[in-house]
Structures are given as structure tokens and as C-alpha cells.
Image (spheres, rainbow, N blue to C red):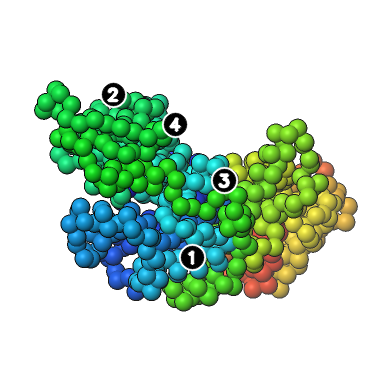
Amino acid sequence: MGVKNLWDVLEQCKKTLPLHHLHNKRVCIDLSCWIVQLQNVNKSHCPINNKLYLASLFHRLRALIALNCSLIFVTDGSIPAIKLCTYRRRLNLRPEAQDGANSHSQNLSSLKRNMGSEFSCMIKEAKLLGLALGIPCLDGIEEAEAQCALLNLESLCDGCFSSDSDTFLFGARTVYRDICLGEGGHVVCYEMDDIERQLGFGRNSLISLALLLGSDYTQGVRGLGLEAACQIVKSVGDNDILRKIASEGLSFTRKKKNSKKQGQVKCNDKETTLSCKVNMNGGIQNSQSDDQYLRVVEAYMSPKCHSADSDVVHRALVQRPFQHEQLQMLCSRFFEWPPEKTDEYILPKIAERDLRQFAYLRSTSSQLDVNIPMKEVPVKCPVSAIIKRRKVHGRECFEVLWEELYGIKSSVVPSDLVESACPEKIKEFDDKRALEKKNQRKSRPTKSGKQCSLTEIDQKLQHLLLDIELGSESSPMASREVISDQMPTATEVNFMNRDPPIILDSYCRATMLCQETDITAPKHEVIDLLSPSPQVQSRVVSRCTQMNDQHITIIDLSESETERSPEHVRKARDLRLFLASIRDDFN
């Protein structure tokens, strides 16, 4: 399609650009080229009825929509008369001799396409899908790539997607040949500025290469290779190549066998109009062959297209609204997707597009030295708040909460987009996180119901110890002495120690170790009151002694064959729990 081997000539001018290069750009799409690409990729995997090519088109569109890329579908119109021979040859229809075909094509007009063919039905479905996504469609008069090139040449779009290399011959300045989605997504781009600077080929030179190498409109010069054709065009130069073809035809591409001219060449006043030319062997060609060269040049220089100021073009440049329900119906019909799956695919992209539009509005205002606070911007920011930071494929992102938009609540967007659109939201998020971290560094508040003074702790501990002693009076393994009412009330408790010795002077002063007095006591053991359920068999030996003029009661816990009473065990367990709670409060 296009000029034979021209992509090979332009290979060194190819640029692979990241996908976000297209953000905020307006791009025309040669829809037929995209459908052919996707059909060729998918036809080996599944039949056309599965519409996998249409699903691939949907994913391409949603990726470009998220970049706020304004898209315009451009479709082919009638088949140009000059292309009928090539068209029939590709479809193997009514092969004719080349000379007869050339002479006959002069009297033919363009041929309308079969709108009922399978490929035309695929184009119709793609147009329906595009309209539901808000993508307008411009139906060309003849060649879609010519219409795309005209819009690009007139600066009505930033570039055009097409795999036809003759798009440059129609005047395009930027052509995107291919697109790749997913991680590391990119587009393959060719710029006419690079072609002119690196190769020295302008538009006239490319048209000359089409005449020499062959294209959709001509079969070229037989036996002339790619390298030789490029050298010939370079040797003449872009400014003079068409003038030379107008004056000499293609005879200058081969050396004449005879140094003497075999014919007289005459030309009209117009440099691009031929009345007679020298043929390959030096003879004069007939006027019909002369017109064939002229018609090829004319087809590239002045293709049949909608003019840039036409109403048809103006309508195509207006973006359509997104039709949510219509898209759900089409996806259900084409792909058998439930509405939820369709929304999962498209709504985050629509939201991201709206955020890019908001960012573009603010950046444009800033360039004009009009710095408007976010709350005063006429268009409401689509981001309600930032939820948290995320990293997707190694890229810093934010999970954001959206304003009411087709029912979507949250999604993940690149952090640089949020930075350009609403840096105020990032500051709010960072301030909130800093405040939360500050609060976390503070000491945890004491649990409710456990805020008590040391006096209250002393009283509770005294009552528990007293209840333990009184509850053991009926037990045969315990005996007590009456505690003097003149005892001091001071309390000494080390609550920060995990296993503190208990020394009380309120009702009794207790120790966990037996102290030797005037009698010999049996071997004693220490009871761990903090253990869940100590298995200790002991008897309490209460002894009173006078120490430093104070009445002291020593509770002696020693081994015994008789277990303590259940009430005594319960009281001891309560004491253990109480001491554990005190330790937790102080820790």
C-alpha cells in the first residue's frame, strides 16, 4: 500500500516515542488502515465473527482517550479512477493489458465502493463504536490518507495515523505508522522535517520516487532498484525533479545508447504539464503515455478531498459527547460484556481524560500569566481527594477519589498528572499524613475504666489482700493472728517490676520468702502471682513479730498436702489479674 519500498527509504527517520507523547493532541486516523492491521493480527487466532479486531480497536481508543487525545476517524470514499487498475489487480478482477488499462482509465471516473461488503460492514461497526466514545467520523471523497494529510498540512490536526506511505506524498507532515499499548507503550512516528533534513527528500522527491519505484497509481520503471532510484532523485534535487520529469519524462533515468538525440522535446508553459516526452529508448512517447505521468503527479498534488474550510470538516472537528448507555449496548452486542465490565474498562479512562483537560486548562492559564486558585477555576476539578500513594509498573501514582462521574468512585492515575492538575490536593494529602504520623508518635491514651490514682490502687490492693486472709479463716491449713489497729498505713509497691515483692504496711506487711525468727520454719517457695494458674500446694503460717517497734505479720506459704479453698484460689487469681492490669497501665 502506498509507494513501493518507501518505508525502507524512510527507516532511518523513524522515531519511537512514548505513548504520552500524544497527550492533548488532535490526531486523524485512517480507519481502513487500522482495521486492516487489527484484522491481519487477529485472523490467525479466531474468526472474524468473534470481533476480536473490534475489541482491539476499543482498547486502542480507550488508551488514547485517557491521554486527552482528540481523535477523528477518516474513512475512504470512492476509488480514484487512476487506482482502478491496482484495485482490480489486488482483487484479481478482470485482468487487462497494461497499455489498454492505462488508455481506458483516462475515460473512467471514480468507482463507488461496495458498502455491503464484509470489510465495509467492519468499518460501519468501528464507526458506531467510535461515535459512542465521542469520536467523530469524516467520510472522505476518495482516499482517506489524502484527507488526513490535508488536515495535517492545514494544521487542523497534529498528525495522522496511517500505514500508507503515500500519506507524505499528499502533503502530511507527521505520520504515526503504528501504536503499541501496555507497559512501555509507544508510537512509531515519522516527521517530514526529519526526512528533509536527513535524506534531502521533500514532497516533490517522494512523488518522483513513486513514479520510479511504483505506487498505487503507477507501476514504476522496470528494472530500476531502490538505491538507484534514490541516487537519481538526489542528484537532481527536490526543487528541480518534477520540472525535469515534465521536460524529459523518465528518459533521464537511463543512459541513452546513442549520444545523439533521437527526438525533439517540446513542453507547454506549465512545467508540470507534458505535451511530449522522450521514451526509455530515446524515442518520442505518444500523448496517452505522457498524460499518465501527468495524472500521477496531479493525483498526489491535488487529491479530491473536503477543503479545510468546508462545513463537513468543521463538523468533524467538534468532539462528540461520550454516550455511556450506547457504549454499554454496543459492547454487549459485539463482545457480550455486561455493563459492569464495560464500565471497568472505560470509566477510569474517561475520568483521567477529564483530569488532563483540567490540567491543560490550568497550564494554559499559567502560560498567559493568569494564575487562578483551584477553587476559582470555572471548571470543577474532577478529583475530590487523594486516597493513597501507589506504584504501578514502577511508576509513581495516586489512588484518587473522583467527584460524581458516571458512577465511578476511585481509580489510579499518574502522580505527575495530579501534580499538574491539582497540586493543592497533594498538599492536603501530605498534611493529613503528617498529622496522622504525629498523633501516632504520641503515647497511647489509657484505656477507659483504668484511670485511677495511686491512692485508689492502694485501697483496692489492701481490700484484696484482706479478703484473701479472711477467706482462709475457715480453712484448716491457715491460722492468723489479730492485726493490731495501731499499724501504720504506709504502702510500698514497685509496680514497674514484672515480679515485684509485695511489702505492705496497711493491714499487713507481706513477704514471699520466709524469714527466720525464733523458730525454725520449713522450706518455703515463692508464688508467682502473675502466672495464669499456678499449681501450688501450700499452707499459710501466720506469725507475728515485733520489728522496729512495728507489728508485722509474715504470711508463710509452704508446702502442704491439703489444697487451698476455692474461695482462696479465686481471691489470689483476682489479685494476679489486678497486678497484671497495673503493669499494663504503667507500661
Instruction: Give the label, 2 or 3, closer to the camera.
Output: 2
Mark pair 2, 3: CA separation = 34 Å
What type is the residue that disc 2 sits on?
Ser
Query: How many other residues sit within 10 Å of disc 4, few (<14), some (14-19) or many (≥20)?
Result: some
Callout 3 secondary element:
loop
Locate residue 65: give its quadrant: bottom right
Residue 46 picture location, percent across and down: 29, 69
Mark pair 1, 4: CA separation = 32 Å
Is residue 368 depicted above or below 165 in this figure? above
Task: Name the one closer to the observer, 276 or 9.
Answer: 276
In contact (CB < 8 Å): disc 1 and disc 4: no
Callout 1 secondary element:
helix
Residue that carries the numbered disc 4 in the rendered image: 193
Residue that carries the numbered disc 3 in the rendered image: 156
Residue that carries the numbered disc 1 in the rendered image: 127
N-term-proximal mark, 3 vs 1: 1
Residue 208 picture location, percent across and down: 31, 36
N-term-proximal mark, 4 vs 2: 4
Residue 269 picture location, percent across and down: 41, 33
Residue under the image location 50 percent in, 73 percent down: 330
Residue under the image location 43 percent in, 61 percent down: 77
N-term-proximal mark, 3 vs 4: 3
Question: In the image, 453: left or right of 254?
Answer: right
Is residue 62 depicted above or below 166 in this figure? below
N-term-proximal mark, 2 vs 3: 3
What type is the residue that disc 4 sits on?
Asp
- The disc at residue 235 is 2
